[in-house]
Image: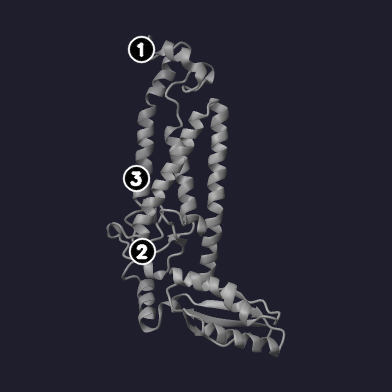
Amino acid sequence: MEPFRAAPPVAVGSSDAGSNPKGSTTREAYDLITDGFRPGFNGPLLLVSEVRGPADLDALGRLATAVQQTPGVVLAAPPMPNQTGDTAVLFVVPATAPQSVETEELIDRLRDEVVPAALGGSGLEVNVGGVTAIYNDLGDILGRRLPVFMAVVIGLSFLLLLVVFRSVLVPVKAALMNLLSIGAAYGVIVAVFQWGWLNELIGVDRTGPIQSFAPMMLFAILFGAVHGLRGVPHLPHPRGVPARHPTSRRTTRLWRPTGGVCAGTSRDEAAGRAGAPRRRQRAGSQLSSSMTRTAPQQDRTAEGPRSPAWG
């Protein structure tokens, strides 16, 4: 998740049931477990290892003792072998909620420090799993891949615009527009879902991490929207030369004296291009309406636009 530590810090992960709407059965069950036990019981960790004999079970017993003494752990149950005796699992309950940063740090501490120190020389390989650890790993992977994904997409679009327009200014402006739009979008997400600004207006009563898939999906949507809304040229110049191309200056000089219809451009083409701003406006309105319909949903994991047939 380190690529997201810059300002604004986008903490990616997975929201737990504590972020569900109040009154839902999952939220009520989450609150009952939290009040009756501890928040960590909503997302326990599983330490799993192969077992080759009694000596391995003894080593796992020492691991359970070391884990129990680790700060941030409420419960570390003794190793439980399966019926065939070749696999054992340790049930570990963190003291903090599944989506909290402290739980993420505990998972890293168990993997990097506690498990290697407790099993040194035993030859056992213990894997830290469970739903909480899975979503934590997913957030780490997507967090590392997103900068590469963004660099490849923006870089390819830069090269394409460079070839088409034969100018450096146009692709540079396009790349900056993409970076500014995605930066603004990430800032709004952080302000609402992490900092809690105006979150009650959309029914979110608890802050937390951003869904791990959201930054990548949002970048793809905004990249398409930015290029789609400004991708149609205002004027179809002869031989397909774009309006910003240096060789189109003569066409531009011909355009102005004729009142808008240049040589080589039919009236139908000119009329079609004249309606481009209106089409862009309609496309932007449809996109905004589609995205806005997801906001009133009271679930942090925003639902997509729904058809009336879906209820």
Q: Position of residue 24 (x, y in %)?
A: 34, 70
Residue occupied by mark 1: 259
Q: Amino acid at mark 2?
A: Thr
Q: Amino acid at mark 1?
A: Gly
Neighbourhood count class around disc 2 (C-alpha, 10 Å): few under 14, some 14–19, many 20 upward: some
Residue occupied by mark 2: 207
Q: Amino acid at mark 3?
A: Ser
Nearer the camera: disc 2 or disc 3: 2
Residue occupied by mark 3: 289
Q: Position of residue 75 (x, y in %)?
A: 49, 84
Neighbourhood count class around disc 1 (C-alpha, 10 Å): few under 14, some 14–19, many 20 upward: few
Element at badge 2?
Answer: loop
In front of the other: 88 or 159: 159
Q: Position of residue 226 (x, y in %)?
A: 44, 38
Q: CA distance from mark 3 to mark 1?
A: 36 Å
Quadrant location of the C terminus?
Answer: bottom left
